[in-house]
Image (cartoon, rainbow, N blue to C red):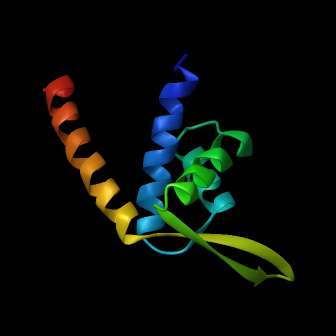
Amino acid sequence: MVDREFIRGFVKLYALWRASKGDVYGLGILSEMRELGFDLSPGTLYPALHKLLRERDAVVRRRVVGGKVRKCYRLTPKGREELEEVREKLRVLVRRVFH
């Protein structure tokens, strides 16, 4: 079984990437990651999203959807820089490990 800390890194990376594509709700990220085979709980995802907010890598907007207030996440310019840095480091690592 994959270590929980290892999974948290994937969660943060996916959340960064997904928020770079436009506004996204936490449950949307959770659902997408589950489709990819990650058995996540909100207790794993939301701390990662809160960390992105604290680090100013993302911002949140509140929207009313179906009569409920939903938090919508979007990457900041700082978050885009971090995502690109992480992607480059990951490319190097993946080339080493899988080639």
Q: Camera-side residue: 12 or 59?
A: 59
Quadrant location of the N terminus in the rendered image: top right
The residue lying at 57 percent from left, 38 percent from top is: 38
70 over 98 or under it: above or below: below
Instruction: Name the residue furthest top.
Output: 1
Instruction: Name the residue furthest right.
Output: 67
71 over 35 or under it: above or below: below
Percent coordinates x, y for residue 96 in the rendering: 15, 26
Q: Camera-side residue: 19 or 98?
A: 19
77 over 98 or under it: above or below: below
**Hey, which quadrant is residue 94 in on the image?**
top left
Q: Is 34 left or right of 88, judged from the image as shown?
A: right
Quadrant location of the C terminus in the rendered image: top left
The residue lying at 22 percent from left, 41 percent from top is: 89
Percent coordinates x, y for residue 20 in the rendering: 41, 67
Percent coordinates x, y for residue 84 in the rendering: 26, 56
Percent coordinates x, y for residue 47 in the rendering: 65, 45
Q: Camera-side residue: 78 or 15?
A: 78
Q: Is 79 left or right of 33, judged from the image as shown?
A: left
**Hey, which quadrant is residue 70 in on the image?**
bottom right
Number of numbered discs: 0
The residue lying at 25 percent from left, 51 percent from top is: 85
The residue lying at 54 percent from left, 74 percent from top is: 23
55 over 41 or under it: above or below: below
Q: Is 62 left or right of 37, judged from the image as shown?
A: right
